Amino acid sequence: MESSFVCTPRSMVTMLYSLNVNPHSGKPHMVRCRGWTTLLVGIILLLGYGWDCPAQRRFLTPADVNALPSKPPDHRLFYGRGSLQFGDLRLPEGSGPYPVAIVIHGGCWLSRFADVRNTAALADALRDAGIATWNIEYRRLDDPGGGWPGTFQDVARATDYLRSIAEKYHLDLHRVVVIGHSSGGHLALWVAARHRLPRTSAVYTPRPLPVRGVIALGGPGDLKRFMRHARSVCGDRVVTKLLGGTPDEVPDRYRQASPIELLPLGVPQILITGKYDRAVPPEYGQAYAEAARKSGDTVRHIIVDRAAHHEYNAPQAVTWPAIKSAVFSLLQLGDSGPSNEHRRGRSQ
């Protein structure tokens, strides 16, 4: 009798669930195997999707990532009065102070494509690695008040909100990095760049929270260069709508919103790109990295084989080692993460 299993990443995620395996936990789990085929599929997923699937089915989709298991956040906190102005705070074991990763999801700057669920598994895995995570939501260009300047103001406000909660939740604001996926990668680079904004800018913030570095996961750093490609990927003129006009119509906004226009950022930047990422292909990361280096910044561009545009947010995928290493290196942590003295008991 032929197996009815269809080789897709999502079906493998579902099969892993049936094995009662939590890929984010370091604790052993009992595995109830209902046949060698089921067990084999679970092992293949954990090894990085080594199944010889058809090329068009070998990569993850946003729905696959949203379906990944993750533990709930410790706290959902609102940095503003709007329903989308919140973040999910996850705290690692230990008494702190905890290094922090600000996590920004993508989705073409559109609410219909992604929300905090899409980066929940990534944020949870970083928390399990000993890093507090602040997975933020924000208004997109199709939300009331989103676009220019609301989207940028939300991300800036969410970042600076860490100052308000650092003492209560034992956060180390001297060790903060920002990591973003896709359009969230653009926003992550912008967060690291906003200290370069002129005081006259609508998105200027006095005394922005300093960050140790930024990690862009398949994120565009040059909005002008990305405009035409974004239209084919997102199905809309999203960059023009995000900023309220073309570069000729609103040139100041492009100078203030596009990270490449704000170089040098003055902090290390790590760009991680899937070799088969068609949403933001490797050449975009390479071009930005070259410009950043010429400006004097320290930049690394890492291309991960067997990855496309949504593997970044799946901690059991091939991109995870590069992402974890990047976060640890920017926070200047050892291979084992934060020291044991910070992880003795659960913070209250």
Image (tube, rainbow, N blue to C red):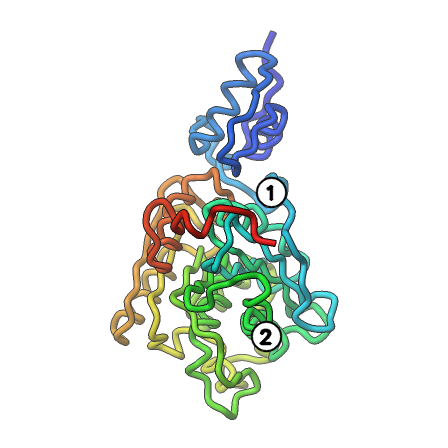
Specify whether 142 is left or right of 286.
right
Q: Which residue is mark 1?
A: 70
Q: From where the camera sits, is residue 240 visible?
A: no
Residue 114 placement: quadrant: bottom right
Specify whether 215 is left or right of 9.
left
Residue 108 placement: quadrant: bottom right
Label 1 is placed on what type of residue?
Ser
- Residue at (55% x, 74% y) in the render: 160
Relative to 217, residue 52 above or below: above
On the image, the x and y values in percent for residue 41 come to 52, 23
Please tell me whether mark 1 sits on a helix, a strand or a loop: loop
Residue 321 placement: quadrant: top left
- Residue at (55% x, 69% y) in the render: 162
Please tell me whether mark 2 sits on a helix, a strand or a loop: helix
Q: Which residue is mark 2?
A: 157
Q: Count of labels shown?
A: 2
- Residue at (29% x, 71% y) in the render: 297
Q: Are marks 1 and 2 in contact (CB under 8 Å)?
A: no
Residue closest to the eye, 27 or 153: 27
Q: CA distance from mark 1 to mark 2?
A: 26 Å
10 Å neighbourhood of mark 1: few (<14), some, or many (≥20)?
some
Label 2 is placed on what type of residue?
Arg
Residue closest to the eye, 294 or 178: 178
On the image, the x and y values in percent for residue 85 come to 67, 68
